[in-house]
Image: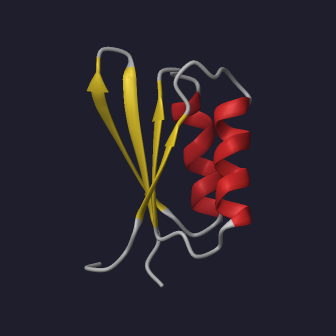
Amino acid sequence: MSNQEIKKLDLRGEICPYPMLKTNEELDSNKDINILEVITDHSPALSTIPPQALKRGYEVEIDEIDNSEWKITLTKDN
């Protein structure tokens, strides 16, 4: 993972279904993404983004980075 670029998607302020839709759009439009960090402050996104990412072959890790803000890290090994 030394030369893998980390793509970041800041979706704070977006409400469902937009965090999931924008994450899916990013993953589908750039098949070379190995690591995508999604920042959200909309808790329902924690249950909508992971299943979509798993369908695309990504592993999912969720970390609370602030009070009611989360980082969803999507990782894919090529």
Q: Which residue is drawn at 73% across and 41% down?
A: 21
Q: Quadrant of residue 64?
A: top left
In the image, residue 57 above or below residue 14: below
For the residue pair 61 and 36, the one nearer the viewer reads as: 36
In the image, residue 73 above or below residue 57: above
Disc tally is: 0
Image quadrant occupied by the N terminus: bottom left
Q: Which residue is drawn at 63% across and 23% down?
A: 14
| Residue 76 coordinates in the image, percent (x, y) | 47, 71
In the image, residue 12 above or below residue 29: above
**Residue furthest bottom as drawn:** 78
Q: In this view, does 15 lie to the left or right of 11?
A: right
| Residue 43 coordinates in the image, percent (x, y) | 51, 22
Task: Look at the image and name its color scheme.
Answer: secondary structure
Q: In this view, does 47 lie to the left or right of 16?
A: left
Q: Which residue is drawn at 56% across and 31% down?
A: 11
| Residue 30 coordinates in the image, percent (x, y) | 66, 68
Q: Residue at x 73, y 64 (%)?
A: 29
In the image, residue 18 above or below residue 56: above
| Residue 15 coordinates in the image, percent (x, y) | 66, 20
